[in-house]
């Protein structure tokens, strides 16, 4: 979706597992405030550790995400941050599935 610019409606995103809640517009702000209160009331060092893990995981390749060697992943992520952005080689990623789900024709 990022590459194509195609959009999904909320029920489809929920059905595909891309979101975990769909909230009516008039309930959105109270829902978000409750979610923020839940986060703030949680163990803050734990929350920060989880957020760091997410940030490190976003810099890893698909194979590194599956691999459960945390310290090595952190070292790889740090090395990549120091090296800066990489150029696309033009090759297809080996970590992507052979066939991605197709959008319904009315959403293309």
Image (tube, helix red, strand yellow):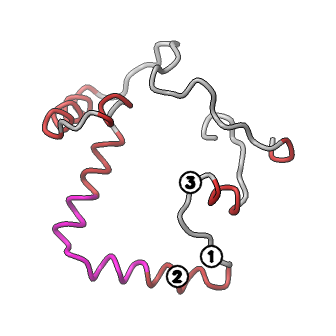
Q: Name the residue under label 3.
A: 18
Q: Name the residue under label 2.
A: 31
Report the quarter where the N terminus lies.
Answer: top right
**How packed is label 1: few (under 14 Cα within 10 Å), some, or many (20 or more)?**
few
Mark on residue 65? Answer: none
Q: What secondary structure do most residues of the magenta stretch adopt?
A: helix
The residue under the point 56% across, 54% down is: 18
- Residue positioned most to the right: 106
**Element under disc 3:** loop
In which quarter of the view is residue 13 placed? bottom right
In which quarter of the view is residue 35 placed? bottom left
Marks 3 and 2 close (CB-CB < 8 Å): no
Marks 3 and 1 close (CB-CB < 8 Å): no
Q: How far apart are marks 3 and 2 (CA)?
A: 18 Å
Q: Name the residue under label 1.
A: 23
Residue 50 position, x and y percent, is 25, 58
Residue 51 position, x and y percent, is 28, 58
Q: Distance between the residues labelled 2 and 1?
A: 8 Å
100 to 6, vertically: above or below: above
**How packed is label 2: few (under 14 Cα within 10 Å), some, or many (20 or more)?**
some
Q: Give the left or right position of residue 54, taking residue 2 as reference.
A: left
């Amino acid at each position: 979706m990022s590459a194509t610019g195609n959009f999904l409606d909320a029920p489809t995103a929920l059905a595909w597992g891309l979101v975990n809640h769909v909230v009516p517009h008039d309930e959105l702000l109270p829902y978000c405030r409750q979610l923020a209160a839940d986060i703030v009331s949680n163990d803050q060092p734990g929350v920060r550790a989880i957020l760091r893990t997410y940030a490190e995981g976003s810099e890893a390749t698909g194979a590194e995400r599956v691999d459960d060697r945390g310290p090595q992943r952190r070292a790889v992520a740090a090395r990549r941050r120091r090296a800066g952005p990489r150029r696309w080689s033009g090759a297809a990623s080996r970590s992507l599935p052979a066939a991605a789900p197709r959008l319904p024709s009315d959403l293309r």
